[in-house]
Amino acid sequence: MDYEKIVLVTRKTRLEGLIERFNTKAQAEFYITHSGGDFALFEREHETYHAAFDELRRGLQGLAKLQIIERGFLPNFIFAENDLVVTIGIDGLVVNTAKYLSGQPLVAVNPDPAHVDGILLPFDVAAAPAVVRKALKGQMTSRLITMAEATLNDGQKLMAFNDFFVGVRTHISARYTIRFGQSEEHHSSSGIIVSTGVGSTGWLSSLFNMADGMALRFAESGARLERPALNWEADQLVFVVREPFVSKTTGAEMVCGKITPEWPLVVKSEMPENGVIFSDGVEADFLAFNAGAMATIGLAEKKTKLVVGDVYN
């Protein structure tokens, strides 16, 4: 397929967020400085990002029709089938964008390689125009990254690029019934994390870090857990129950597992209010998950087409 339009997705800098909060740059500077912060850090970050954005925009102009949107407009933006998507920002911008795509290629650009790790950002600003030029003609190497999908019994759905959280929006315990395979158990816990392969270095890794730390301190052998090997394309997800509490009515035997196409995770809410399912750390975009709701969490049919490495000739 030849792609006819480039959609460039941007994000606000932290400085722009501060100015929105405090109305003016001077007021933002006053607040940060009097709180003991370094306002110059926010200014340098802002200048670096916008210099990279301006260079990338110039490099993309003329290659195809160019449309620029800010991250906050993604939930209401409709991507066309023949759009080629470019993001310039941190890894989180790729995560935020991916769930709204339906197979369109995504070229992720690192605006500041000196300070942004960029696990999902294979290209810098200088290299990106050449990559996009060939990608517009379908000449690209890409990875089809597995995503997760949560479906409620009323038909509502939510996608996740990194992970899902299932639980309560407050700090009280989540109550639910979990069903995995032929087994079922009532739980009282701090919620469930469901991770994709690409998200396994995030929230999921922190759960293993906690378990390893406890084993190091309390287990005689001090052995560490063997972490599941999940590549980005794997048709598997991993779920872990956080802080399960054992009581007369709740158990803690079904606290982790690998979700496959044949073995989805089913969770039935027993929470009267404030139950939620949200993805990728975005709490504002959630499914209400209160008593009577049942969620089936499994692999999504669609995958993110992330352009990586060298394009072919």
Image: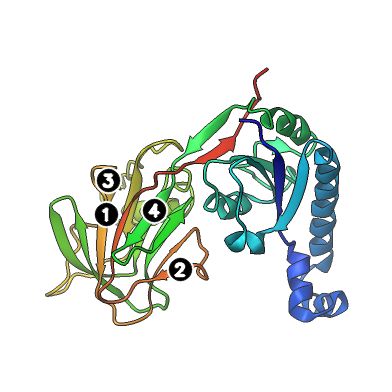
Check the image and report above or below for 75 versus 305.
below
For the point 75% across and 72% down, which residue is it?
18
CB under 8 Å between callouts 1 and 2?
no
Residue under pointer 3: 221
Residue under pointer 2: 286
Q: Earlier in the sequence, mark 1 or mark 2?
A: 1
Check the image and report above or below for 109 versus 208.
above
Which amino acid does the dot numbered 3 rest on?
Ser
CB under 8 Å between callouts 1 and 3?
no
Which amino acid does the dot numbered 2 rest on?
Phe
Cα distance in 3D space between marks 1 and 2: 18 Å
Q: Residues within 10 Å of mark 1 (few under 14, many from 20)?
A: many
Return the x and y of residue 305 as percentages of the image width and height: 54, 38
Image-quadrant location for residue 213: bottom left
Which one is in front in this view, the residue at disc 2 or the one at disc 3? Answer: 2
Which one is in front in this view, the residue at disc 1 or the one at disc 3? Answer: 1
User: Could one spot residue 36 in this view of the protein?
Assistant: no
User: Which quadrant would the C terminus be assigned to in this image?
Assistant: top right
Q: Earlier in the sequence, mark 1 or mark 3?
A: 3
Residue under pointer 1: 265
For the point 80% across and 49% down, which residue is it?
53
Which amino acid does the dot numbered 4 rest on?
Glu
Which amino acid does the dot numbered 1 rest on?
Leu
Q: Earlier in the sequence, mark 2 or mark 3?
A: 3
Indicate the secondary structure of the residue bearing disc 4: strand
| Along the line of sight, the residue nearer the viewer: 308 or 101 | 101
Indicate the secondary structure of the residue bearing disc 1: strand
Check the image and report above or below for 75 versus 308.
below
Cα distance in 3D space between marks 4 and 3: 38 Å
Return the x and y of residue 251 as percentages of the image width and height: 17, 66
Residue under pointer 4: 149
